[in-house]
């Protein structure tokens, strides 16, 4: 069984830990995206308990691009199964907390759903907290995603070796894509001799993008597994967050908890862009750290 690339950060000098958090990056990203925030989170939590942070490269991304036997289809379900297979291979504790950004947020939701349904076997343990960072829980239909989808398909027409980041930005802009999106895609190039190549697998990423766009997890939010908190952390963007979706989430968060199921919470980070953990890391820590610490001291 092949497993995705990962890195462990343990906030204890003895290399021992009591709790585990898993962090999953977004589309076109890698575990490097989370590195600074992960270390800050581990440091903040070090006063409460010894934590292990496991940061992964999803299939078709980062160091997982070169790993064989991560079989298609390249969809959200299989990306979540990759996570489960990783923890099976580690023969240790399963994650108490799962944190996913953007597409990684949908992978986190799928992981929790499949875990609750028993798809990962008897050894799998449900996470106690799920943090979904700026990821829509439902199907996605907006102009930004349409542009991103078209841009990804355009990458299939490009040569495997790109002259430079500047060349790619100019090429994409000339094709009618926004400079912001063009620069974001070009930031995921890596050096290959005298040229540049993508740090992700284009065909696989397209499949994952389309799967993430078309999947929805409202049923999970309406009936979270008992003992689990699903925390949605969103920006104020009205482009990303349709008012009807926001209202639906707020309604779920206000429901009274009767003990038969878990709960949903919603947190808004003002003035942040999509990459909340980079744009507003201190505010995100203020939201997350006390809730994660409450697993150590339940009365907090």
Image: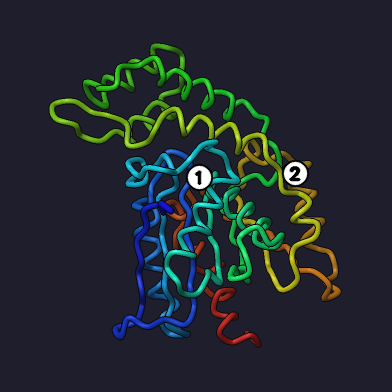
- Determine crowd level at label 1: few under 14, some 14-19, many 20+ residues with C-alpha closer than 10 A: some
Tell me where residue 268 appears, x and y as whole percent.
62, 56
Residue receiving disc 2: 245
What residue sits 53% from the left and 31% below the top?
A: 207
SS state under label 1: loop
Q: Nearer the viewer, residue 69 or 298?
A: 69
Tell me where residue 146 appears, x and y as whole percent.
59, 24
Residue receiving disc 1: 273
Q: Nearer the viewer, residue 295 or 173?
A: 295
Q: Nearer the viewer, residue 152 or 83?
A: 83
Q: Nearer the viewer, mark 2 or mark 1?
A: 2
What residue sits 48% from the left and 40% below the top?
A: 71
What residue sits 13% from the left and 26% below the top?
A: 194
Q: Nearer the viewer, residue 121 or 45?
A: 121
Q: Is residue 93 visible?
A: yes
Image: 156 above or below 95? above
What residue sits 55% from the left and 74% below the top?
A: 292
277 with respect to 161 (left or right)? right
Q: Is residue 235 visible?
A: no
SS state under label 2: helix
Q: Return the residue found at the far left.
A: 194
Image: 196 above or below 251? above
259 with respect to 233 (left or right)? right
Tell me where residue 280 appears, x and y as whole percent.
46, 56
Residue 123's quadrant in the figure?
A: bottom right
């Amino acid at each position: 069984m092949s497993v995705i690339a990962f890195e462990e950060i343990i906030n204890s000098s003895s290399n021992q830990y009591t709790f585990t958090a898993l962090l999953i990056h977004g589309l076109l990203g890698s575990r490097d995206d989370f590195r600074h925030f992960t270390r800050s989170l581990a440091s903040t939590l070090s006063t409460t308990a010894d934590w292990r942070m496991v940061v992964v490269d999803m299939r078709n991304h980062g160091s997982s691009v070169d790993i064989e036997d991560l079989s298609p289809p390249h969809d959200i379900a299989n990306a979540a199964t990759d996570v489960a297979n990783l923890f099976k291979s580690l023969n240790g504790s399963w994650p108490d907390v799962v944190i996913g950004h953007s597409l990684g947020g949908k992978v986190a939701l799928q992981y929790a759903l499949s875990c609750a349904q028993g798809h990962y076997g008897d050894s799998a343990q449900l996470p106690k907290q799920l943090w979904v960072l700026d990821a829509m829980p439902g199907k996605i239909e907006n102009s930004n995603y349409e542009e991103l989808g078209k841009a990804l398909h355009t990458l299939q027409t490009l040569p495997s070796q790109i002259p430079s980041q500047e060349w790619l930005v100019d090429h994409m802009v000339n094709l009618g894509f926004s400079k912001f999106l063009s620069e974001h895609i070009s930031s995921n190039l890596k050096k290959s001799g005298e040229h540049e190549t993508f740090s992700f697998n284009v065909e696989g990423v397209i499949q994952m993008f389309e799967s993430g766009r078309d999947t929805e997890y409202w049923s999970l939010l309406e009936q979270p597994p008992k003992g689990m908190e699903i925390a949605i952390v969103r920006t104020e963007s009205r482009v990303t967050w349709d008012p009807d979706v926001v209202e639906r989430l707020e309604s779920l968060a206000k429901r009274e908890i009767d003990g038969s199921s878990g709960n949903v919470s919603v947190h808004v980070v003002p003035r942040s862009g999509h990459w909340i953990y980079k744009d507003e890391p201190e505010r995100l820590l203020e939201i997350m750290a006390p809730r994660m610490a409450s697993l150590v001291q339940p009365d907090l």
